[in-house]
Amino acid sequence: MPVGIIYIAVGMLIVAVAPLPYGYYMLLRLVATGVLAWSAYVAYERQYKILPWVLVLLAVLFNPVIKIHLPREIWAAIDVGVGIFLLAISSKLRDQYPS
């Protein structure tokens, strides 16, 4: 996975702590679900044991179709936590060829 896409998703997750219009959070759900699902696929292809399942659960949490309603404070903590998690595993998800 191109590392730039991971950094964009992380940036969007961190910015989501600020009070923004509802449309931003819907866009964030789409981007986060896509990046997390793609990351789960990459982790599965690289034969990691637990990482793909964690990423799938996070993708389900962020999915825009069946929304999970949580208080704003909890979503803020989840957004920051998932952003840090994506940064921590980004080296495992990077493309194996030079960009």
Image: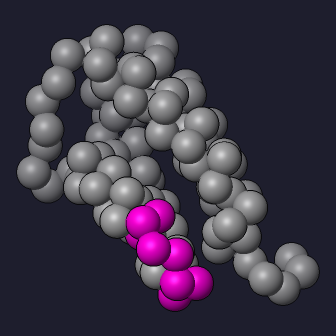
Q: Is residue 30 visible?
A: no
The quarter of the picture where residue 96 lies is bottom right
Q: Nearer the viewer, residue 81 or 38?
A: 81
9 lies above or below 13 = below
Q: Is residue 36 left or right of residue 97?
A: left
| Magenta stretch: helix, strand or loop mostly | loop
Residue 73 against residue 70 in the figure, above or below: above
Q: Position of residue 40 (x, y in %)?
A: 44, 70
Q: Position of residue 25 (x, y in %)?
A: 34, 34
The structure's colour scheme is one colour
Looking at the image, the residue that sits furthest to the front is 49
* Residue shown at 14% from the left, 55% from the top: 65
Q: How many numbered callouts?
A: 0
The x and y percentages for residue 84 are 60, 36
Residue 28 position, x and y percent, is 40, 42
- Which residue is drawn at the image coordinates 38% and 30% (left, top)? 78
Q: Quadrant of the N terminus?
A: bottom right
The residue at the point 74 percent across, 78 percent down is 95
Which quadrant is the C terminus positioned in? bottom right
Residue 55 on the magenta span? no
Residue 51 belongs to magenta span: yes
Q: Is residue 69 left or right of residue 47?
A: left
Q: Which segment did they paint magenta?
A: 45-52
